[in-house]
Amino acid sequence: MKTQLILLFTIILLCEYSESKYVSWFPNVFDTFTNKTAQLTNYVKEKGRSIRNFYVQNVRNKITYYFGGNKNGTKIYEDKQLRIKRKFQNYLDESEANDNKIFDSIAPEESTYKCDDDPSNQMTTPQLLVMNGYPAEAHTVMTQDGYILTIHRIPYSKNATSKTPARKTVLLHHGLLGSSADWVLAGPKKALAYILSDSGYDVWLANARGNTYSRAHVSRNIDTFAFWNFTFHDISQNDLPAVIDYIMEIKGWDIKINYIGHSMGTTVLFALLSTKTEYNKVLRAGFALAPVAYMTEIRSPIRLLARFSNNIEFLMKLLGANEFLPQNAVLRWLAKHACEINHYEEAICENSLFVLCGHDEKQFNKSLLPIILGHVPAGASTRTLIHYAQEIRNVGKFQQFDYGPEGNFRQYGTADPPEYPLHKITLPIALLSAENDWLAGDSDVNSLYLQLVNPIDHYVVPLKEFNHIDFLWAIDAPTLVYAKLLQLLEEGASDSYFSSNFERVISV
Ligand SMILES: *[C@@H]1O[C@H](CO)[C@@H](O)[C@H](O)[C@H]1NC(C)=O
Ligand SMILES: *[C@@H]1O[C@H](CO)[C@@H](O)[C@H](O)[C@H]1NC(C)=O
Ligand SMILES: *[C@@H]1O[C@H](CO)[C@@H](O)[C@H](O)[C@H]1NC(C)=O
Ligand SMILES: *[C@@H]1O[C@H](CO)[C@@H](O)[C@H](O)[C@H]1NC(C)=O
Ligand SMILES: CC(=O)N[C@H]1CO[C@H](CO)[C@@H](O)[C@@H]1O
């Protein structure tokens, strides 16, 4: 508890300090370039350095402040953190001297960019937003275990008269192998982030540890197992609270955040709400697209890994110990078994996201393929994949990582890993699922829905072929999913809907 308080305080400190730092350059970019021109391309290439410097300053200041921890004479964390500070400073100096590593990872420069390509294929999320005329911000958030996350934001509508952030707040969390880019790749009027912004929301886009924008840590090198030693559990316990607290610190503690997750973005929400139950009161409502908790009815080839999932060492050898490598032999093998390889599907079948989640030809907009392949997969740890494989093997159990009996005793003090107590989730939650989902099967979503103390709705997309990633990029996603989602979001606008619903359930 004490540690938590200190951490919370630290997060507050971090947030306060950063507030004045982030706004300066994005509006500038926004004003200068609002269309996709050769000039923008050059700008991106030339300004890579100044963007990088922005991150250098931002992160360095933040970390110095964090470890200095000197607020009104109160020194926090000092002794313990001094060592890490020194270590990190060395790392920082080294990175700067070599002109690479940590900050390139946060804001990758466009070094692999080819001039005849459409530049948007390689653009970062804020660059895409700016290119489409939307205001964009990037914020750096540090988790209590030292991961440095970069989250993105569209603070107000493109056509808003006032340039102050909207009060209505929504946090979007991507799925496995995804990033904030998932929510914008389909472009204005199509992609959910733009639609929400157009509807007057302050839109925040999370990036979990390990993905394109969150590949840095105060002391762990990205090339080490120590960095990649995490599963979705760690994202739920550390990344989500850090991001939510950060947003509230920026917007005020009375703000109520709507949470929209896709796939793993829903898993981490359920894991968070069932363990750190105070977040049930902090958020306003949860909207789960392609929800994944129980995994008994799995058509994804990930099920093929399930039977090995008690042999973690073997799987690590198979998949790569650290980052789940998108181009390995196993995946190619899975691809062969998952898709009927034909001409244009070749690219799809080599991409881990499509291999694991399936592909729906009718709803897939082929023109989006280059930009999707340019952004996906965005990085995930092998351990997260193994964790999911374990869920499949332990049919019907949504639980923490299984280290085997001995390891579990060391980690949890019990022979079996603890299950997530879903009945402790009191946040109003809506589930939006699809019949042809390889990862979130009907019966699993139904049993999840029955567990919810305060369900809002379970909406099944009225199209048989609709699948797991169609929630992001399907041609008809705006009409089939987002319209309903907006309606559910707005219905709660009075808040009385939620509170009365809540009371009803409590009184039962
Ligand atoms: C796009 O930007 C270029 C360079 O700033 C400018 O010359 C051109 O007029 C712009 N086009 C539109 C439609 O705004
Ligand atoms: C912004 O414009 C879109 C159409 O592009 C419209 O649907 C929306 O209502 C507008 N939002 C605001 C806040 O004016
Ligand atoms: C990996 O994480 C687990 C659980 O947090 C921990 O017990 C273990 O020591 C870590 N291993 C390494 C090498 O960091
Ligand atoms: C497919 O994507 C392209 C590129 O974003 C877009 O111009 C086009 O309108 C989309 N087609 C459909 C049917 O949504
Ligand atoms: C008592 C005191 O010195 N309070 C100061 C603590 O720091 C904040 C700024 O971080 C000042 O506004 C307070 O006056």
Image: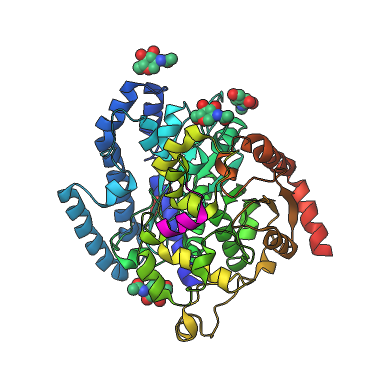
* Rendered view: 441 above or below 100: below
User: Can you give x and y, in whole percent of width and height, for residue 179 in the image?
Assistant: 46, 47
| 481 is within the stretch colored magenta | no
Q: Which residue is drawn at 63% across and 35% down?
A: 476
Count of numbered badges drawn on the protein:
0
- In the image, taking residue 78 as reference, residue 286 lies left or right, namely right
The answer to whether residue 376 is seen in the rendering is yes
Region of the chain picked out in magenta, as a range = 332-341
Q: Which of 274 and 307 is in front in this view?
A: 307
Q: Name the chief secondary structure element in magenta.
A: helix
User: Can you give x and y, in whole percent of width and height, for residue 270 in the image?
Assistant: 61, 61
The answer to whether residue 408 is seen in the rendering is no
Question: How is the structure coloured here?
Answer: rainbow
Q: Quadrant of the C terminus?
A: bottom right
User: Can you give x and y, in whole percent of width and height, for residue 482 in the image?
Assistant: 65, 39
Q: Nearer the viewer, residue 252 or 148?
A: 148
- In the image, taking residue 213 as reference, residue 484 lies left or right, namely right
Task: Please state the quadrant of the image where ligand 2 appears.
Answer: top right
Q: Which of 148 and 354 is in front in this view?
A: 354
* Rendered view: 361 above or below 433: above
Q: Residue at x 80, y 58 (%)?
A: 503
Picture quadrant of residue 50: top left
